[in-house]
Image (tube, helix red, strand yellow):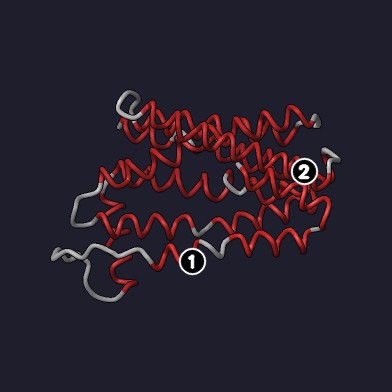
Amino acid sequence: LAGPAIGGPLLTRLGAESALIISTIAFAPVVPLYLLIKPHHTQQRSAAKGPLVASLAGGVRYICREPSLRWMFLALFVMVLFVNTWGGLFPTIAEDVLHRGAGGLSGIALAVGVGALSGAVISMLMAGRVPDARQQFGGGLLFAAFVIVLAVSTSYPLSLVATAAAAASGAPFFISNMAATQLNASEEFRGRVVSVRYVVSAVQPAGLIALGAVAETAGPSIALAGSAAIGAGWSRMPALARRS
């Protein structure tokens, strides 16, 4: 929350280069803290042995055999590829759609932070009370819906509200998806399943490239709304898997 609030004035007054240099320097105090971390070693060994690719392939085969994991991974793939790429168009939306420039961009970034923090609190409150499938279905659907509102909005206040609401909705989806993925995986395969999940998350740059290409020809609003609409259509996969 403090980052965008500080970065916005720096960006408008000092320029992008100076703001980036200051942001980079601000990370320096974290490095000694990492050096103080001492990992706890146990005698337990992972069941995954052999080359990395073979271990990942074993995780993929295990996921394909488990219906709940299979559909959660498919939903994650679609959300990462089509909806969670929304941040890539923030600068364009702030500049070309809302006509707010760097100050508007910092406001959008701040709204994301407020929304994500609120969504994390909501996710904690729902833990144990709302099934994971409902959190993923509801969170994913609302995330995509509020991104569509952001895409079609030309009002800066409405865009800030939609951005915060989208981030607040997306947090329960990703948090519950991560937790349910680990809980539904057997202890033997859990490490490999989590590894595959991070590999799936790495497809986001491909979604950003596609989103940028569509925005270049059709405009940022159409590109963002269309991409989020695809995510909304697929966000119900975890709920369908749970019913089956």
Q: Earlier in the sequence, mark 2 or mark 1?
A: 1
Q: Residue furthest left?
A: 43
Residue 206 position within the rendered picture, expressed as x and y whole percent measured from the top left: 59, 59
Q: Residue furthest bottom?
A: 51
Residue 74's mark? none
Neighbours of disc 2 within 10 Å: few (<14), some (14-19), many (20+) = many
User: Which residue has dot 2 on it?
Assistant: 93
Rendering quarter of residue 33: bottom left
Label 1: which secondary element: helix
Neighbours of disc 1 within 10 Å: few (<14), some (14-19), many (20+) = few
Is residue 203 rendered to the left or right of residue 240?
Answer: right
- Answer yes or no: do the residues labelled 2 and 1 have beta carbons within 8 Å? no
Residue 134 position within the rendered picture, expressed as x and y whole percent measured from the top left: 39, 28
Viewer-side label of 2, 1: 1
Residue 72 position within the rendered picture, expressed as x and y whole percent measured from the top left: 38, 43
Quadrant the C terminus occupies: top left
Name the kind of residue labelled 1 in the image: Val
Relative to 120, residue 62 above or below: below
Is residue 24 rendered to the left or right of residue 178?
Answer: right
Residue 190 position within the rendered picture, expressed as x and y whole percent measured from the top left: 25, 54
Residue 31's mark? 1
